[in-house]
Amino acid sequence: MSERNTPRIVPLVVQRHQPLQVPPAAFEAARRMAPTGRVEDRLHRPLRDLRISVTDRCNFRCNYCMPKEVFDKDYAYLPHASLLSFEEITRLARLFVAHGVRKIRLTGGEPLLRKNIEALISQLAELRTPDGLPLDLTLTTNGSLLARKAAGLRAAGLQRITVSLDGLDDAVFRRMNDVDFPVSDVLDGIAAARQAGFGPTREHSAGGLKINMVVKRGTNEHEILPMARHFRGSGTVLRFIEYMDVGATNGWRMDEVMPSAEVVRLIQSQMPLVQLEPSAPGETAERWGYADAQGRHDVAAGEIGVISSVTQAFCGDCNRARLSTEGKLYLCLFASNGYDLRALLRAGANDADLASALGHIWQQRSDRYSELRSALDPDTSSGGRRVEMSYIGG
């Protein structure tokens, strides 16, 4: 099945916008905020999950994320000096953890392109929550470098990996990544991750390895059932993600979104499913287990997940913050601007100032873009420029 012939309008935009101002109260002696292990925003959502983008570069050109028309050979990526160093990332992460973060996900771009990423993982793996527990440390990758990196990532202390894989058909996969990369190499990376120990654990019975498939109607929806059959019973959770209106360069249209409910119905028609409880508060994926003959969850067969950020907003319990490659803090995947933490770091701010800034920033958060989307234009979701997913991470 080929992509639709509808012309895609791809605006040429600058994805790095002017930073927001840190609330001045953060630095006032009488209003300084020390971390207590829990900070809530205006909608009473705690800070629990931190996504850290370690690079704005990627070796794929998926048209829903980094279309080749924009991210070509002349595109100006961030110079290395603009990126947060591993020590700066770890310092900020430690302060986020003091405010209640329990999970850190490394993203990109493609995070495995960041040189010596294993050193950063080792530093983050040493962090502990206020009650002395290790963090849930995970990473999202396109899998292209995973075969050679998996063992080293595991040895460095990485607990879980999520691989983006949008189909098993090689022609479809090459067309979607737009750099003619073969699907077999990603499958080899997944196999290497399993061999390295990213499988089911006592803490994560669903597995230390997950697969994310972005479903774009007219492009790869015919790969849903083959993907489900391939990963059923493998100990690897497959999650289907609705094609999202992130940024401004992917030419997003609502008619290219395949609702998660439709995905579930399609799989259910061939492989019976039973709905499962959320694995954690604020979890983005709705869980469905493969059912046995009695209609109960067949644990050996495993489960799938669906992430319905377009058709079923989950802003109400969103507990995620996002730190960009150059140190800007974004409070929503669909944000337009972030807070420049790198400027504070490099101006010599001490830990007390940084911690207070983080607390005040989160306290004033009221973002709920997905819940408000229905009031926007159905095709473009216009409502201001938004940061690109390739820059902020998924």
Image (cartoon, rainbow, N blue to C red):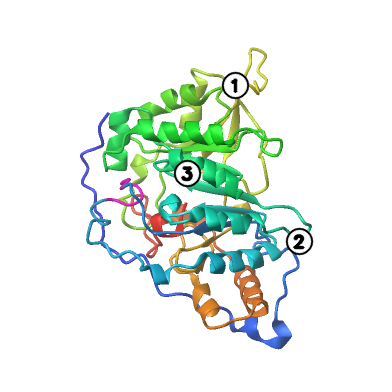
* Marking on residue 301: 1
Q: Secondary structure at mark 2?
A: loop
Who is closer to the viewer here, 375 or 165?
A: 165
Label 1 is placed on what type of residue? Ala
Main SS, magenta region, reads: loop
Vertical order, 245 against 225 (above or below): below
Residue identified by numbered label 2: 130
- Looking at the image, do the residues carrying marks 3 and 2 touch, with CB atoms under 8 Å apart? no
Q: Secondary structure at mark 3?
A: helix
Q: What segment carries the magenta color?
A: 61-67
Label 2 is placed on what type of residue? Pro
Q: Give me the residue at 70% from left, 65% from top.
A: 98
**Relative to 389, is 157 on the left or the right?**
right
Q: Give me the residue at 60% from left, 26% from top.
A: 302
Vertical order, 29 against 242 (above or below): below
Whether residue 99 appears in this view of the structure is no
Who is closer to the viewer here, 352 or 158?
A: 158
**Relative to 252, is 106 on the left or the right?**
right
Mark nearer the viewer, 3 or 2: 3
Q: Give me the residue at 32% from left, 67% from top.
A: 14
Mark nearer the viewer, 1 or 3: 3
Q: Give me the residue at 67% from left, 47% from top.
A: 281
Q: Residues within 10 Å of mark 3 (few under 14, many from 20)?
A: some
Q: Does the magenta-highlighted stretch encompass residue 65?
A: yes
Residue identified by numbered label 3: 149
Q: Quadrant of residue 355?
A: bottom right
Q: Quadrant of residue 18?
A: bottom left
